[in-house]
Amino acid sequence: MTRFIGAATSLTAQGIQACADTLSVHPAELWAVLQIETRGCGYFADRRPAILFERHVFSRGTHGRFDAQAPDISNPKAGGYASGPAEYPRLEKAMALDERAAMESASWGLGQVMGYHAAELGYGSVEQFVSRMMASEDEQLAAMAAFIQHNGLAQALRNHDWAAFAHGYNGAGYAKNEYDKKLAAAWQHLSTHGLPDLSVREGQLLLTFLGFEPGTVDGAFGAHTKAALNRFQSEHHLPLTSGFDPATLEALRQAAHPPPSTTVPTAQQVPVVPTQVLTLAPRPPAPVVVKSPEPVELTPAAPTPAPAPVEVLPVELLRQKLAQPLGNDVQQELARLLALREKAAPVLGPTAIQSIDLGLTALLSSEQPNLAFVRGIRLRLASALADQLYPLRPLPLLRSSSPATQVVLGLGLLMLVSNGMTAFIHSVLTDESTQLFGLPVRTLLLVGLCGAMGGVVSILMRLSELEKLQGASRTSMVMLGFFKPVIGLYSALFCFALMKSGLLPLQPPKPESEQYLYMAVCFLVGFSERLAKDVFARAEEGLVGAASGQKPAPLAAP
């Protein structure tokens, strides 16, 4: 059944990192789930998504109407698996009875997400869900991440609570298949031996599609992979190498993904979601052809001609769509995609343009646009574009979605800004005799720094609490880390002024310990917001008491 053959592109670093950031996990946790669920590959050798058809789900979805007629594919009892590509004849037989229920009864792709979850994960229909599974392993991984997030399993994955994760992901029968033990072993191996090499993995997948049988698609360059690679290089008159060099990888991509044929596809070749193809012409000098996923030959292809000119989306069609009562979200996503397409074309190349055009198709060719899918495409490509434009951005620390990490980034930014300025003021602009408002400047600088350090310590001790603020604005978290010590500094200076004025009646037990008292109180004011508020309240009471001749109340313990 060629209708399930799509672009079938391999996993990318951007796709993995985007899902890891979404779930606030390390890529090793994601790889552990992938290796146990589908042995790390989302496609069969014939380019169709990896599936497993569940006859008991089909029976339940069709209310047992076909149990007597076809017990091998509609049965209240699970089982009857054929494994591998042989699952597709079972799916075909079920689709002849009830097409939608059949696709909902199969698990799809890298994460083996069941089709009946499509609507709750943000896909408009199971047909749209299956279409995305055909497009790329990045889409398959995004579906797995959406399932994990929707079912509240991200925390268990972060904590390596494999039993809780396996129970939520695979159901109550996880212990029988030892999913928790397998996940733990996979994560341990990945953590100690490193993650799969994505270049090797892409080469293995392309060799598999072309029929060269490199063995398991696992990102490890072994003997089977090397033999398959050298056979491909020999047939295409390339130098024999012991790895996937850029020239060989490019040749593999061209052979596995030739330019779309100009012939009209037959009825059997129509993709699962028959939608109008909408493409936009990027600025020269990089014209590309962007079409819906089409079936391709699975044998090594001869050198291909230059791509045909790109199809241009008629302005009149855009005008018609925009004349309709589109929602604000749809209009905003459309504007963002068009702007991103123009910027991404010369930097990210044809693959990115194809993904953007899929998003445009989803927005303009459907009565109910799949905004979650379109937004996911835009965010991933915007992140990939930023990685190319800003060299430091790929650092995981700078891209983390963890609130605690964002606060620490703000704190680090403050340290970077203030360190040199503080040292300059202390060593160049001041000496022991320099005074401000009759007070030694170095003393003011000292108590201010004590208050700032109190704010820093307060932040570091509250990191676990800050981590619970998932979903908070990244800017607000960075600003919290940046300004909390600044607030501590000014609070300490104000507290110092209160003590020197007598409004805050704190006296050292010995005159020589006066400076240490100031430092300790100012640190505590910067550390404790409650104590700072209490100090300010007592100062207010002191002012009122001074006016009325009463003594101020004693300071409460922090």
Image: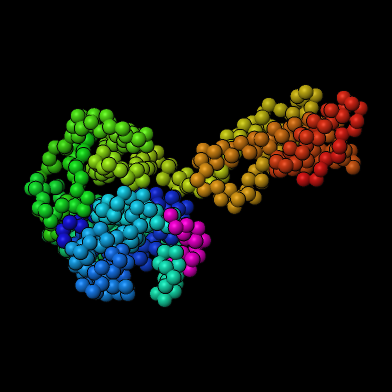
Observer able to see residue 432: no
Q: Nearer the viewer, residue 337 or 485?
A: 337
Q: Is residue 296 magenta?
A: no
> What residue is rendered at 80% in x and 45% in y?
557
Magenta span: 150-166
> What residue is rendered at 47% in x and 52% in y?
24
Q: Nearer the viewer, residue 492 or 73?
A: 73
User: Residue pushed farthest right?
Assistant: 549
In the rendered view, does 493 fall on the left or right side of 376?
Answer: right
In the rendered view, does 315 fall on the left or right side of 154?
Answer: left
Where is residue 539 shown, x and y percent of the image?
Answer: 80, 32
User: Residue pushed farthest bottom?
Assistant: 176
> What residue is rendered at 86% in x and 39% in y?
554
Where is residue 442 shown, x and y percent of the image?
Answer: 74, 32
> What residue is rendered at 33% in x and 54% in y?
118
Q: Is residue 545 above or below residue 58?
A: above
Where is residue 217 shown, x and y percent of the image?
Answer: 28, 63
Q: Nearer the viewer, residue 429 or 334?
A: 334
Image quadrant in which the C terminus is located:
top right
Q: Is residue 131 above or below residue 93?
A: above
Q: Is residue 165 magenta?
A: yes
Where is residue 394 shown, x and y percent of the image?
Answer: 41, 45
